[in-house]
Amino acid sequence: MDIIRSTPIADQVNEVLRGRMRDGVYKPGERLPSESEFSKQFGVSRATVRTVLARMEAEGLILRKQGDGTYINERIQDVNTHLGGLWEFSRLIESSGYQPSIKSLSVESRPASEREANELALQPGDPVLALRRLFYADRQPVILASNAIPYRFIDEAQGPFDGQVRIREFLVRYCDLKIAYAILDVSSALVDGEDARLLERAPGAMMLKIHIIFYDRDNQPLVCGDSYYDDSVLRLRLVQTWG
Amino acid sequence: MDIIRSTPIADQVNEVLRGRMRDGVYKPGERLPSESEFSKQFGVSRATVRTVLARMEAEGLILRKQGDGTYINERIQDVNTHLGGLWEFSRLIESSGYQPSIKSLSVESRPASEREANELALQPGDPVLALRRLFYADRQPVILASNAIPYRFIDEAQGPFDGQVRIREFLVRYCDLKIAYAILDVSSALVDGEDARLLERAPGAMMLKIHIIFYDRDNQPLVCGDSYYDDSVLRLRLVQTWG
DNA sequence: AAGTGGTCTAGACCACGAC
DNA sequence: TCGTGGTCTAGACCACTTA
């Protein structure tokens, strides 16, 4: 591997190891080289190797056993996601084996609802940019997402808005903002009327509803939104690990 | 603080800091002492302090800002859970402000269904211990959980079985097994008949369904199960963070 | 006994934010 | 400029598994 300064060494090692796992250099269920072996191989300290392995362990990709070794978790290989899957819809659709695409239904500026104002720390009636988007798995609509962003965040010089872009990228490109964390509420819900029609489901169909608010490092709310998620097509599969 | 060997220093520091947050020594939104300050204060290396803070950051409890400082995230204080909330039902109910209790509906040995056999790496018909439990928030039933454990895991000398115990503790006490990770599928579902009656909901009520399989470090499946979760009473609120 | 991951230290340098 | 968190190193010792 070529070590380049400027991007953290740990990230580079991370990429190389994930690449080797993808390419089958290390096979599912197999035992990996030891930490000191990696340390020699990459010319980095064992501590650095360990931060990389800790990250992979937290995602369930590997299993480490004291006194024994580190093994690739063959059950996580294909599909499964981290919590991120709950909202990184494109990646989720992709990992379920479909071709993801986004259709922008509407991009408009309007006054914030009371709930939006409350969640985004605005006054009711302050302008927000409202995005309404439909996510497709291959040709089938599977997720209907509605988001609101305080209009004052938006640098209009960057326009026109591309409604097909992911929220995270949207915030970077048009607002120069970075998400630090999100709070999600998961519930079940019925879809009706226009929503059902867009999702090509019968009125009264059961779906998962995900309400989400994104915040930045300064604890400023950036975006809020509701998504309806067709769990008859997409599986919502999560991994939970412990120390 | 009294430093005791035998439990890791990082865990002890962790406990002390969480205690101070609970007790209001550090208040929501407030800036914490610097890493080197903690390092001096506890007489441990900065690296140790950092592993503790990293853990808290991953749970969304604190926000760290380079060049500035570390702040307590006031939005996470009260209720919110980590992914663990999806299945550590007692803790979830508690954090929603209710008194949790568990009623054991049935504890029986029976042959594994085809699906169970598949998920637990058994032959169909191999015996499993089937637990059926109802979780209450105060006096209201909110979660109906059905789990199956391969019977060969169970050390009968430890019996009789206590159906009111949590799965994690059950595995430790009766099977000497430790959970390493779990894979969950979240979907929406209707409850009917007996299930609806137990949950005191009308037949055809909408609920969240959580299917889960637990594994140990050797990637051996330990338990599988289905849970119905009344999201009209309990909120399922998750936190997602990024590096 | 040898090798593995788990914990911890002391110290270095860097990037960034506030003053 | 100074203090903060972010990254990395080299080395030590321990606990555990396997042979």
Image (tube, coloured by chain):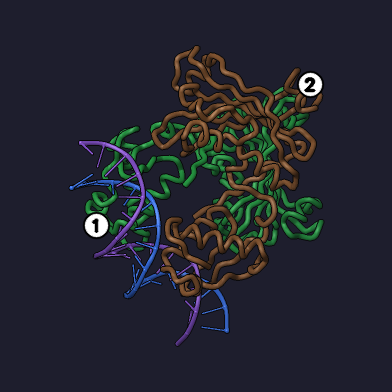
Chain colours: A brown, B green, C purple, D blue
| Displayed quadrant of residue A78 | bottom right
Using residue C12 as the reference point, say whether residue A1 is left or right of it. right
Picture coordinates of residue A50, whole percent (x, y): 46, 63
Which quadrant of the structure image shows residue A164? Answer: top right
Q: Residues within 10 Å of mark 1 (few under 14, many from 20)?
A: few
Up-down relation of residue A241 to residue B72 (above or below): below
Instruction: Report the residue that reaches farthest toward the front.
Output: A157
Q: For marks 2 and 1, give the CA distance.
A: 63 Å
Residue B235 position, x and y percent, is 56, 30
Task: Identify the subunit bearing mark 2.
Answer: A
Q: Residue at x 48, y 15 (%)?
A: A126
Query: Amino acid under label 2?
Result: Pro
Residue ranking furthest to the top: A125
Which secondary structure, mark 1? loop
Q: Residue at x 50, y 12 (%)?
A: A125
Q: What numbered label is drawn on residue B43?
A: 1
Q: Give the labeled residue for mark 2.
A: A203
Side of A5 relative to B170 (left or right): left
Question: Chain ID for label 1?
Answer: B
Residue drawn 72% across and 46% down?
Answer: A96
- Looking at the rendered structure, the secondary structure element under dot 2 is loop
One can see residue A16 in this view = yes
For the residue pair A165 and A240, the one nearer the viewer reads as A165
